[in-house]
Image (tube, helix red, strand yellow):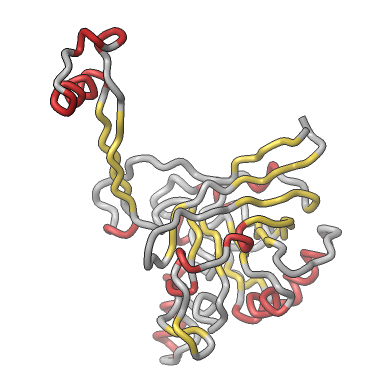
Amino acid sequence: MSRLVDLSFVVEASPRDLPAFMRIEVEYSDHAQGAAEFEQLLGVDRRLLRDEEGPAGERLSIGTHATTHVDAPWHYNSRIAGTPAATIDELPLDWFYGPGVVVDVRAKADGDPVTRSEMEQGIADAGHALAPRDIVLVHTGRDAFIAERDFMWRGPGVTPDATRWLYEQGVRVMGIDAWGWDAPLDGQAKDAKERDEPGILWAAHQADIPYSQIERLTNLAALPATGFTVACFPLKIKRASAAPARVVAILEGEA
């Protein structure tokens, strides 16, 4: 027996004044419209359908980063470690299914860094022996604000050094229950402009390593610190920088 824990946010229509890359639009067609479509497509009267109803359906317009999603290296830069960066459809499937561990950083304030030493300690505190292809999930607790308009300005950020350390341990997928893996961009942008130097804004994304990150996770509080498997397969969108994913944790031996 196993228990499944859904770590994904719902795909639903968003406020229309959001920037295009953040917006989701869902157009619904009901069973009466479906019957009309069958009449047009197949030339049959709707009375030949059960309750004179045809198929309900939806049309979806969604930014690939607009809900729970997996980033590809192509999102960060056109070249990573001196070679063309991989798009989401080019990444190996075995990256997206593996043992998971939760690093608890809920005590961190918005904008605080999650350093390499804190990442190492968090994994040790979880009682987990990190291995290649493990999937590391950073628990900030900011999913409590995922439907709020200021969600993108909340949460701590994982440092480039901590990100590189995970990569050096063989981790290829790492995730967070905040808007982004980096600290909120307003604070990073302020620091970058004041210091007038690169390597501050979006620094963990642009750490020059070919890894994937899961952003906008939910429900990490329902997981144990370790002892579960993560499935986070992204949609196979050609040449895409990211794709929405239904992220699920599998807890074996639980009903």
Q: Position of residue 189 (x, y in %)?
A: 42, 77
User: What residue is shown at x 47% (from left), y 74% (from top)?
Assistant: 86
Residue sitting nearer the eye, 62 or 236: 236
Find residue 71 and report its horizontal and vertical position in percent: 48, 65
Considering the image in quadrants, where does the C terminus appear? top right
Q: Residue at x 72, y 36 (%)?
A: 3
Which residue corresponds to the image point at 42% horizontal and 87% vertical from the top-left?
A: 194
Classify residue 58 by image quadrant: top left
Q: Is residue 241 left or right of residue 25?
A: right
Residue 251 is situated, as x and y percent measured from the top left of the image, at: 75, 42
Residue placed most toward the observer, 91 or 174: 91
The relative height of residue 49 versus residue 236 in the rendered view (above or below) is above
Out of 211 and 144, give the one closest to the viewer. 211
Residue 231 image position (x, y, % from top left): 62, 51
- Quarter occupied by the N terminus: top right
Q: Across the whole image, how many numbered discs are drawn on residues?
A: 0
- Left or right of 202, for residue 59: left
Q: Is residue 233 above or below residue 10?
A: below
Q: Which residue is depicted at the point 33% across and 44% down? A: 14
In-image side of 114 versus 117 (left or right): left
